[in-house]
Image (cartoon, rainbow, N blue to C red):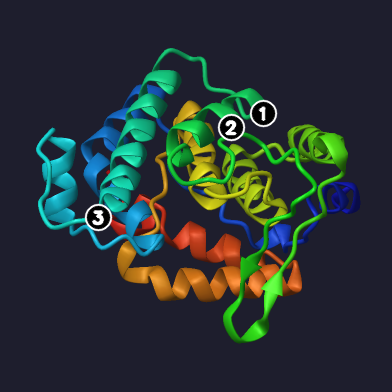
Amino acid sequence: MSERLFAALGFTWDRSAVKRDLGVHTVERAIWRYQRALPEFVWDAAALEGNPFTYPEVQTLMDGITVGGRKLSDERQVANLAEAARELVDVVKTGCFRLDKPTSDHFHYLIARDEALSPSPRKLTVTPGVGLGEHGRYLPPSTEPGGQNLREMFTRGIETPEAEVEDPFEQAIAYFLFATLQQFYFDGNKRTGRSMMNGHLMAHGIDAISVSALRRAEFNATMVGFFRAKDATEAFAFLTSCHPDLVDGPS
């Protein structure tokens, strides 16, 4: 029942509106297309965080050449995203990718180890929040001592969709939104969630999704609406519209 699913994740969506006719290919083909666009994935992810690196600068840094005139923190963010992207390829290629806590913790460490308050799941009683501009601030569930409530929430959020949702595309997007809403880490939740989403997609032969830097304002507005209403229908539609089959056409 969808009620059990929605309760486990903390939000609802119109399941009948989810697009289910996107291309499904081999895992190898999905990985190949992701690798081909790797600098774009890294640049998009960095730009969504407000990182000033240009696309050519991201390409240069990924080629192992430093870029002058940029803050070290910005350079490290791009380098970490690139390392995590390459690691995602390796993990999916070897068949080791899992939509689970150890995998999420691993990619979060790679992505946010130089900037997060703690490069691990939040275990303290400090609870992070998300700024919503004129709409104030969203606060996720508070952290109980030891973080056991978060671990239990994460387990429900993984196991329930696995049992209730058959479509891996719907599972992947639901996971990203779940991880983003519940804020299991002090920082890097959206970046980690997108990596996990894309790993799940590619592991099922579905092309990965990159939110274009050119759509940053639209993405932010969509996520604010999601945080406020706990209704993911528009977020599903937006993320689906970013899928390469719809942006570039099937290939």
Q: Nearer the viewer, mark 3 or mark 2?
A: 3
Report whether 85 appears left or right of 142: left
Q: Residues within 10 Å of mark 3 (few under 14, many from 20)?
A: few
What residue is at 64 percent from the left and 75 percent from the top? 225
Residue 102 is at least partly visible in this image: yes
In this rendered view, identify the residue nearer to me: 132 or 164.
Answer: 132
Alpha carbon of mark 2 to alpha carbon of mark 1: how far?
5 Å
**Quadrant assignment for the C terminus:** top left
User: Considering only order in the chain, which callout, 2 or 3, is on the residue closer to the N terminus?
Assistant: 3
x, y percent for residue 128: 68, 56
Residue 33 screen position, x and y as percent: 28, 36
Q: Nearer the viewer, mark 1 or mark 3?
A: 3
Q: Amino acid at mark 2?
A: Ser
Which percent across, then down, holds residue 87? 38, 25
Camera-side residue of 105 and 146: 146
- Quickly name the residue at label 2: 104
Give the image location of residue 134, x and y in percent: 61, 87
* Residue 141 lies in quadrant: bottom right
Image mark count: 3
Are the residues tagged 2 and 1 within 8 Å (C-beta)? Answer: yes
Q: Dot 2 surroundings within 10 Å: few (below 14), some, or many (20 or more)? A: many
Q: What residue do we see at 19% from left, 48% from top?
A: 58
Q: Which mark is residue 68?
A: none
Gap in angstroms between the C-alphas marked 1 and 3: 32 Å
Residue 138 vs 84, above or below: the answer is: below
User: Residue flagged by tag 3: what amino acid is it?
Assistant: Lys
Which residue is disc 1 drawn over? 101
